[in-house]
Image (cartoon, grey):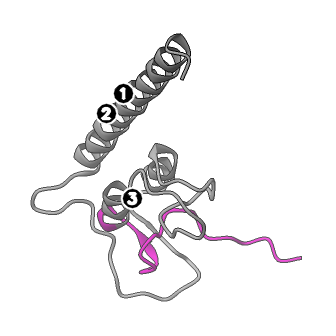
Amino acid sequence: MYTDTAVAGDVNGDHVIDIYDAKLIVNNAGISGDRLKEDLNKDGVVDIIDFNFVEKNFISINPYFPISNKPVEKTKNLTLEELKKTLIDYSCTSELFQHRNSLRNNFRYVYMIRLNI
């Protein structure tokens, strides 16, 4: 039986897990759908859980492919920590926005009941 597997996190398919994979996840956070390459846990949404795979396996090289690429730890302006903070800030803002919309919908429903609409 074949049991070897590569670690999760190589979003862009370059056989390394680095800052560029993390950036793709952050740039696509909140997107939902089937077969998203950034959705590493395949739950249908790109989120912090997917980022955690990249963070856990950061600077890893796929041992099953000969490569000449070296994982990039940071760019001139980006580090993994900065990207994670951006994603967490986005997640908090998104949750607050969803909560606000839910409250608005509940208010509209109650208002419609009171008016017998």
Q: Indicate the secondary structure of the residue bearing disc 2.
A: helix
Label 2 is placed on what type of residue?
Thr
Q: Which region of the structure is painted magenta?
A: 1-20
Q: Main secondary structure of the magenta part?
A: loop
Q: Is residue 99 above or below residue 24?
A: above
Q: Is residue 104 above or below residue 77?
A: above
Disc number at residue 53? none
Q: Nearer the viewer, residue 95 or 41?
A: 95
x and y, in percent, of residue 66 in the image: 49, 89
Label 2 packing within 10 angstroms: few (<14), some (14-19), many (20+): few
Disc number at residue 96? 1
Q: Is residue 10 magenta?
A: yes
Quadrant holding the C terminus: top right
Q: Nearer the viewer, residue 52 or 96?
A: 96
Distance between the Cα atoms at labels 2 and 3?
17 Å
Quadrant holding the N terminus: bottom right
- Residue at screen point 33% across, 44% down: 87
- Residue at screen point 59% across, 56% down: 44
x and y, in percent, of residue 60 in the image: 45, 65
Q: Which residue is mark 2?
A: 93
Q: Is residue 100 magenta?
A: no
Q: Which residue is mark 3?
A: 25
Marks 1 and 2 in Cβ contact (< 8 Å): yes
Instruction: Work out which residue is located at the far left of the displayed protein and give it.
Output: 76
x and y, in percent, of residue 92 in the image: 35, 31
Distance between the Cα atoms at labels 3 and 1?
21 Å
Label 1 is placed on what type of residue?
Leu
Label 3 is placed on what type of residue?
Ile
Q: Earlier in the sequence, mark 2 or mark 3?
A: 3
Marks 3 and 1 in Cβ contact (< 8 Å): no
